Image: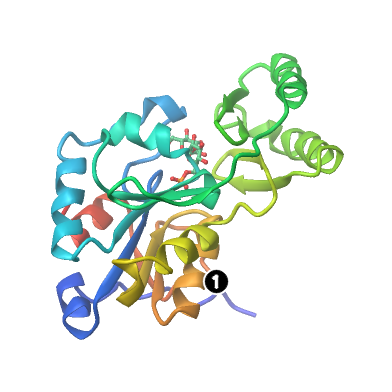
Amino acid sequence: MGSPEPLPPPPALAEIAREAPVALFLDFDGTLVDIADRPELIDVPGHLARNLLRLADALAGRLAVISGRSIADLQRYLGDVPLAFGGSHGLEARLADGTSAAHSTTGIDASLVSELESFVARHDGLQLETKSLGAAVHYRAVPQLQDAVLERLTALSRQHALAIKQGKCVVELLPPGASKAAAVGALMEREPFGTGMPVFIGDDVTDEDGFLEATARGGFGIAVGERVSKNARYRLASPDAVREWCKL
Ligand SMILES: O=P(O)(O)OC[C@H]1O[C@H](O[C@H]2O[C@H](CO)[C@@H](O)[C@H](O)[C@H]2O)[C@H](O)[C@@H](O)[C@@H]1O
């Protein structure tokens, strides 16, 4: 079997929106902002939050930022803006007015965080990111440790009955049920999203769940970058191209 056909670029957003009321779901890292060496080193364009609000307005409020980061973390970069968010891989979601649309209260145990801390301390170059509902081990600086990270976190996920997610140079542990499909689903059940046709844009493997959910609800996914996507219909080359397509 040859490699899959490259995905075409999407029609202009204005053209799609003329046919159907678009509900836009935008992944954050690698989609709205470029990937950086470490999670805290991202360069968020100063006008991004303002332009997201403008676009949300143009879409009658049907826009949400959906991320593996917690909502609190997203707000550190975008401000406490009246936008809808899905955070922690769908374990939390809120509408633009701050109303909760999904909220998990179960995080991970302090004992697990200690185990992760000692694992990371034994391997130079690894970074532990503790989040409100999970933890991530980043190996971007030491890609040769990918297998060791995956093996250790797989063992810990079984021991602690947690979900495991792989992303770009990262392996994460989260309470079961975490998925970007859940975030899309929770928001699509609420106004103003309910009447929309979902379009999910994302760059990473965890965004495939968002593509599938958007497709199941009559919309589609747009993959970002080089990664081969099984479930998206279109492709944009980079976060720059996403911001241009969205006029952000
Ligand atoms: O769902 P996303 O918004 O794409 O978030 C996924 C993870 O993104 C962050 O890690 C990734 O971006 C970092 C900054 O560019 C990069 O250094 C890292 O290698 C990437 O994996 C974030 O730190 C995680 O918490 C998110 O789950």
User: What residue is drawn where x is 15% and y is 73%?
Assistant: 14
Identify the residue at the far front of this view: 99
Question: In this figure, which residue is indicated by the disc labeled 1?
Answer: 230
User: What residue is drawn where x is 61% and y is 20%?
Assistant: 125
User: What residue is drawn where x is 50% and y is 71%?
Assistant: 213
Where residue 88 sits in the image (x, y, percent)? 52, 43
Above or below 242: residue 196: below
Where residue 45 sits in the image (x, y, percent)? 21, 36
Mark 1: secondary structure: loop
* Relative side of 247 to 129, left or right: left
43 vs 157, nearest the viewer: 157
User: What residue is drawn where x is 69% and y is 37%?
Assistant: 146
Q: Quadrant of the N terminus?
A: bottom right
Is residue 5 visible in this depiction of the protein? no
Q: Categorize mark 1 by other alpha carbons within 10 Å: few (<14), some (14-19), many (20+).
A: few
Where residue 166 sits in the image (x, y, percent)? 63, 47
* Relative side of 161 to 47, left or right: right
Q: How many marks?
A: 1
Q: Tag 1: residue type?
A: Lys
